[in-house]
Image: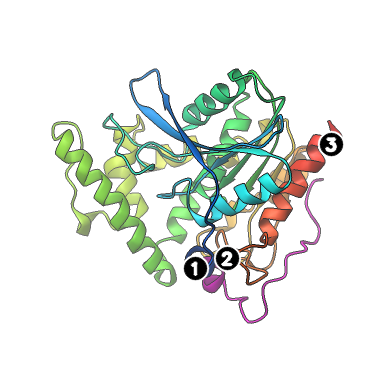
């Protein structure tokens, strides 16, 4: 029964509020100076993915997937990469299609279930011959993507030994509904702005294929996914997309140690995003629910140099799984 009975996370005094935990690490914790090197991975469909490498003299590689409208240089990705490098891991932080600072080539973008792109990244790393062990970490949308990939039973050249999914919307329909609540409207407005800006650029390139952008009619994820995500990626509608891509549908098939780390006060998550029954039944899926932490927050110290609790916890879990063999 891999339910973590009691989380060790304690928020920084005075910063237990979920919104402070969500916002402050993103705007007040820059992680700079990492010696990233970029590689472009060409895909069989004619598109590309931009990969950022942080290499250490080690045969252990951590592949990191960012969140919705994020990228590989965001503080939460860079913070985990730095923490991993300090513990002897090489890191590959990949950018979803259209998220590296350059619009991707095809009409399509990324979405919460695009595990074929993660598979391409993992396979590419494995074929390099440099690594004997691979682990995965994903944030938010990237966490859902990571768990889905694991549950699909891919067989890369170098096996994945463990994974951690942080602040993960395991129930996409529930999370989408949660983001319609008035208390999270500012977050949704930012997502709407960023997503529709990219679809506007796509519409300019592919006017016969990409649906029109109409912000008053595309305010929620249901509306955005019905208009763009579903038809542009082969789903019938938003509900079909959510049903087929939610991590909850794949948890029972996971057969490597996987930690789902979701704060109870995460304003982006619904009750269905805390898969207690699945974790209770699985020998592989571990669920840890700190009382506080917000969304991709877990701010327990005020330092731009020290590792956050979530970063240390992630590397602790992955290290233990690797040592257990």
Examine the image and state in which quarter residue 282 appears.
top right
Q: Secondary structure at mark 1?
A: helix
The span picked out in magenta is 1-23
In the picture, the quarter occupied by the C terminus is top right
Gap between marks 3 and 2, in whole Å? 30 Å
Pick whichever of labels 3 and 2 is earlier in the sequence: 2
Assess disc 2: are there few (<14), some (14-19) or many (≥20) residues with their C-alpha within 10 Å of its C-alpha: many
Mark 2 in CB contact with mark 1 (< 8 angstroms)? yes
Pick whichever of labels 1 and 3 is earlier in the sequence: 1
Pick whichever of labels 2 and 1 is earlier in the sequence: 1
* Horizontal side of residue 83 vs 22, given as left or right: right
The residue singled out by tag 1 in the image is 23
* Mark nearer the viewer, 3 or 2: 3
* Mark nearer the viewer, 2 or 1: 1
* Residue 196 percent coordinates (x, y): 26, 50
21 falls in the magenta region: yes
Residue under the point 63% across and 31% down: 150
Residue 167 visible from this viewpoint = no
The residue singled out by tag 3 in the image is 323
* Horizontal side of residue 195 vs 263, given as left or right: left
* Residue 82 percent coordinates (x, y): 62, 50
* Residue 67 percent coordinates (x, y): 48, 49
* Horizontal side of residue 11 vs 225, given as left or right: right
Residue under the point 62% across and 66% down: 293
Magenta residues: mostly which secondary structure?
A: loop
Mark 3 in CB contact with mark 2 (< 8 angstroms)? no
Badge number at residue 294: 2
Assess disc 3: are there few (<14), some (14-19) or many (≥20) residues with their C-alpha within 10 Å of its C-alpha: few
Assess disc 1: are there few (<14), some (14-19) or many (≥20) residues with their C-alpha within 10 Å of its C-alpha: some
**Front one among 211 and 190:** 190
Badge number at residue 224: none
Residue under the point 43% across and 72% down: 183
């Amino acid at each position: 029964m891999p339910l973590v009975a009691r989380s060790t996370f304690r928020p920084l005094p005075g910063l237990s509020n979920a919104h402070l935990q969500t916002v402050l690490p993103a705007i007040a914790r820059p992680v700079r100076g990492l010696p990233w090197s970029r590689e472009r991975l060409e895909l069989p469909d004619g598109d590309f993915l931009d990969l950022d490498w942080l290499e250490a003299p080690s045969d252990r590689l951590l592949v990191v997937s960012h969140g919705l409208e994020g990228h590989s240089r965001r503080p939460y990705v860079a913070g985990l990469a730095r923490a991993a490098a300090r513990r002897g891991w090489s890191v590959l932080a990949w950018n979803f299609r259209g998220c590296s600072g350059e619009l991707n080539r095809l009409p399509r973008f990324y979405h919460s279930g695009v595990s074929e792109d993660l598979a391409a990244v993992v396979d590419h790393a494995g074929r390099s011959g440099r690594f004997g062990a691979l682990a995965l970490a994903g944030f938010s949308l990237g966490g859902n993507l990571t768990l889905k990939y694991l549950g699909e039973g891919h067989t890369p050249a170098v096996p994945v030994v463990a994974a951690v999914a942080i602040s993960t919307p395991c129930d996409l329909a529930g999370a989408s509904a949660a983001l319609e609540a008035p208390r999270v409207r500012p977050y949704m407005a930012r997502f709407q702005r960023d997503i529709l800006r990219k679809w506007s650029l796509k519409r300019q390139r592919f006017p016969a294929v990409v649906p029109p952008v109409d912000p008053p009619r595309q305010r929620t994820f249901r509306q955005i996914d019905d208009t763009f995500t579903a038809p542009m990626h082969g789903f019938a509608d938003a509900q079909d997309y959510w049903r087929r891509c939610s991590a909850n549908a794949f948890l029972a098939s996971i057969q490597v140690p996987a930690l789902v780390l979701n704060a109870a006060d995460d304003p982006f998550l619904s009750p269905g995003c805390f898969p207690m029954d699945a974790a209770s039944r699985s020998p592989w899926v571990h669920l840890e629910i700190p009382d506080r932490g917000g969304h991709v927050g877990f701010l327990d110290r005020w330092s731009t140099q020290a590792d956050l609790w979530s970063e240390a916890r992630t590397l602790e879990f992955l290290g233990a799984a690797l040592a257990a063999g």
